[in-house]
């Protein structure tokens, strides 16, 4: 394996020269062999250089807690597709095609991801004219033909104040045969903005990748800089980062549980959770001044620390939040009309979840034990483990149950860390970044695995930077959850995943 796949660890940098570069056949065979053994694809990306493109594949083995990185060079404009044999690659291949102008031969449904032109000015993989603007969402959609078949289009403008996305349903009466999801409306070009960094604005850009996941992405970026500069944050900073990450998880899970209650018309829990979510957000604001945790993190540690009085205040707030949230959620579980709507709705099988490479609560609701905090521990999670919450039916009820269990475990974790928060400095100054090195940083955001892959040039500046938000893995899971469901269940299924449009669009 060593001559094809280089084993690395989360948050550890390696020299680019140490990454094996294999021929295309061995590259593809290794992907199939490793995914067949239970490894999953965390990232698959292409970086153009002149007339060639270097393809990197990052594989993850939860059983061993290790990652594997390998590369190959594509010297033309075509490359074999593995999407049929390994479905979790299908979206990665389309992204590479869009960014690098490579056409993946044999891809079953080859079309754009974000509807942008190649950043390097190469020939378009779909042959779209250079002198004509690309319109987001304008493409061929899958169609089902037959009597009593009809098509329903939803979005990109929605009834609520939410992000834009287009959903195309193929229906037979109320039954959904197929859902196709088209995004790209929020593309900002964040990865291109990072080139040549770190810049003064880089951390702010990371915190805005997905606005409700500022801590998750911000911590991944800090880990990138710290690994490339061989900087070790103080223990107090690692603990406070963990508390902030769990507060982010608490706020979002609480809000989603309330929204799920609202989608089935159960207003007591919906109303309570809306307010309690605000209480958890205010705890983040109490620490750093931002309800979303922005401005708390920095490479080398945290901008703020906590004194004894602040720690006690947070513990009191957490105790109140736990009691109120427990009461609100127990109302949900104890109402038969609610449970009848949640149970059996929008189910995804464990086999489908494995094939698609689902992450986060969506995967854990299908009985898959996938959690970066346990599988590839980082920061405080190397010393303090958070038990993995799982369910077994893959439906809306299971996804809701997983969120509730995670809320309880996050509350336990925060209280424990605040009680024993280390004293001393909460930040150190990072050293200069190593040149010609690659690093991978994984964190467990509230939606699931966040992956940042960075490569520096000889000057120690970012030459390449690849971001994979958990929503990139999970949108296909929502499409599968709607198979053979009533179209009226779409809002409920959608909220049970609650994926990020801007995190996907970058």
Image (cartoon, grey):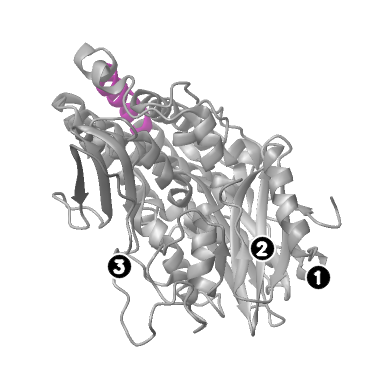
Answer with the quarter of the image where residue 55 lies: bottom right
Is 62 in front, or is 174?
174
Q: Is residue 290 at least partly visible in the picture?
A: no
Image position of 495 with respect to 339: above or below: below
The label nearer to you, 3 versus 2, is 3
**Circle 3 is placed at which residue position?**
136
Name the dominant secondary structure of the magenta segment. helix
List the single residue furthest toward the front. Answer: 147
Q: Secondary structure at mark 2?
A: strand
Q: Position of residue 374 (x, y in %)?
A: 62, 36
**Circle 2 is placed at which residue position?**
56
How many numbered marks have been drawn onto this rendered protein structure?
A: 3
Residue drawn at point x = 75 percent, y = 51 percent: 30
The label nearer to you, 1 versus 2, is 2
Magenta-colored stretch includes residue 312: no
Which class describes the residues within 10 Å of circle 1: few (<14), some (14-19), or many (20+)?
Answer: few
Q: CA distance from mark 1 to mark 2?
A: 13 Å
Q: CA distance from mark 3 to mark 1?
A: 39 Å
Q: Secondary structure at mark 1?
A: helix
**For the magenta stretch, what is the residue range?**
317-330
Is 278 in front, or is 170?
170
Image position of 497 with respect to 205: above or below: above
Nearest to N terminus: mark 3 or mark 1: 1
Which class describes the residues within 10 Å of circle 2: few (<14), some (14-19), or many (20+)?
Answer: many
Nearest to N terminus: mark 3 or mark 2: 2
Is 228 in front, or is 231?
228
Answer with the quarter of the image where residue 214 lies: bottom left
């Amino acid at each position: 394996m060593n001559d094809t796949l280089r084993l690395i660890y989360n948050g550890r940098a390696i020299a680019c020269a140490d990454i094996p570069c294999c021929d295309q056949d061995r590259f593809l065979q290794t992907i199939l062999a490793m995914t067949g053994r239970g490894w999953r694809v965390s990232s698959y990306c292409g970086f153009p250089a002149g007339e060639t493109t270097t393809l990197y594949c990052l594989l993850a083995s939860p059983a061993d807690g290790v990652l594997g990185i390998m590369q190959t060079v594509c010297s033309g404009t075509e490359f074999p597709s593995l999407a049929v044999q390994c479905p979790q690659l299908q979206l990665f291949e389309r992204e590479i095609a869009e960014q690098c102008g490579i056409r993946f031969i044999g891809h079953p449904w080859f079309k754009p991801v974000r509807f942008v032109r190649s950043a390097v000015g190469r020939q378009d993989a779909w042959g779209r004219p250079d002198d004509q603007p690309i319109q987001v969402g304008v493409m061929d959609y899958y169609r089902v033909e037959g009597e009593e078949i009809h098509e329903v289009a939803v979005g990109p403008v929605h009834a609520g104040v939410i992000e834009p996305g287009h959903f195309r349903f193929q229906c037979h009466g109320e039954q959904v045969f197929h859902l196709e999801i088209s995004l790209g409306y929020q593309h900002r070009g964040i990865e291109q903005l990072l080139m040549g960094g770190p810049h003064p604005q880089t951390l702010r850009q990371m915190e805005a990748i997905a606005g409700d996941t500022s801590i998750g992405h911000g911590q991944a970026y800090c880990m990138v800089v710290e690994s490339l500069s061989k900087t070790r944050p103080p223990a107090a900073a690692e603990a406070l980062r963990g508390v902030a990450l769990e507060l982010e998880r608490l706020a979002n899970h609480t809000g989603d549980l309330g929204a799920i209650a609202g989608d089935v018309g159960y207003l007591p829990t919906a109303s309570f959770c809306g307010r309690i979510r605000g209480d958890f957000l205010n705890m983040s604001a109490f620490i750093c001044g931002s309800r979303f945790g922005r401005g708390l993190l920095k490479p080398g540690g945290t901008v703020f620390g906590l004194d004894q009085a602040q720690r006690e205040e947070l513990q009191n707030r957490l105790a109140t939040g736990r009691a109120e949230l427990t009461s609100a959620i127990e109302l949900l579980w104890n109402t038969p009309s609610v449970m009848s709507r949640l149970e059996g709705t929008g189910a995804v099988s464990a086999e489908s979840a494995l094939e698609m490479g689902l992450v986060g609560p969506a995967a854990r609701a299908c009985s898959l034990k996938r959690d970066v905090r346990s599988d590839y521990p980082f920061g405080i999670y190397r010393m303090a483990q958070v038990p993995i919450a799982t369910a077994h039916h893959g439906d809306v009820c299971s996804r809701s149950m997983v969120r509730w269990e995670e809320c309880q475990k996050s509350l336990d974790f925060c209280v424990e860390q605040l009680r024993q928060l280390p004293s001393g400095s909460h930040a150190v100054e990072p050293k200069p970044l190593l040149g010609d090195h690659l690093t991978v940083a994984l964190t467990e955001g509230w939606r699931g695995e966040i992956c940042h892959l960075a490569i520096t040039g000889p000057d120690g500046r970012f030459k390449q930077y690849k971001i994979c938000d958990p929503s990139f893995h999970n949108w296909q899971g929502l499409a599968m959850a709607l198979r053979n469901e009533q179209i009226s269940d779409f809002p409920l299924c959608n909220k049970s995943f609650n994926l990020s449009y801007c995190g996907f669009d970058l």
